Image (spheres, helix red, strand yellow):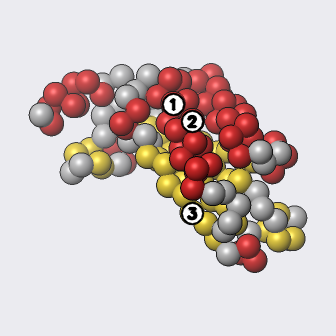
Amino acid sequence: MPIYTITTAAGTLDSATKADLAAEVTRIHSDVNHVPSTYVNVVFNELAPDNVYTDAKPTRPLIINGWVRSGHPDEETSRLVTEIAHAATQVTGIPPERVLVVIGNSPARFAIEGGRVLPEPGQEQAWLLEGA
């Protein structure tokens, strides 16, 4: 259900670091939003180094964009971005000032997975049973 797109300049993260970061993002999201880890999708997007700029200069930031269903309490979303940003720094060694985490949301009915409209937060178990 949720999807995290992690964008970096090519060559910034090796395969093991990507796997560790994906595991941490998955663990944190599952813990904070109370959903099974099987719901969490993490995608890495690597751009040519001359395609990533901050302050009009080529740079190597770590940009994490997450999408979640609307309806999660604001304090949980704040906890989510804080924990993911901290984990990103710990796992990658990229300093906090180069890590950007943004969580966007929209109603569950604006997304489809597995051919079905997503359930509202808290309705996941009923949604799973309906699809079985």
Specify the amino acid type for callout 2. Glu
Check disc 3 and report the residue beneath it. 45
Choose the circle earlier in sequence order: 3 or 2: 2
Q: Between label 3 and label 2, give the one nearer the viewer.
A: 2
Please report the residue visible at 62 percent of the width from the left and 22 percent of the height from the top. Answer: 75
The image quarter in which residue 131 lies: top left
Q: Tell me the distance, in whole angstroms, between the alpha carbons under discs 3 and 2.
A: 17 Å
Spatial separation of the CA atoms under disc 1 and disc 3: 20 Å
Task: Report crowding for label 2: few under 14, some 14 to 19, many 20 or more residues within 10 A (C-alpha).
Answer: some
Q: Where is residue 68 in the image (x, y as percent from the top left)?
A: 48, 40
Which of the two residues, 103 or 95, is positioned nearer the viewer here? 95
- Left or right side of 35 for 74: right
Q: Element under label 2? A: helix
Q: In which quarter of the image is the N terminus?
A: top left
Circle 1 SS class: helix
Location of mark 2 (residue): 24
Q: Position of residue 90 (x, y in %)?
A: 73, 37
Residue at x-position 21% and y-position 25%: 126
C-beta proximity under 8 Å, tags 1 and 2: yes
Residue 45, by quadrant, is: bottom right
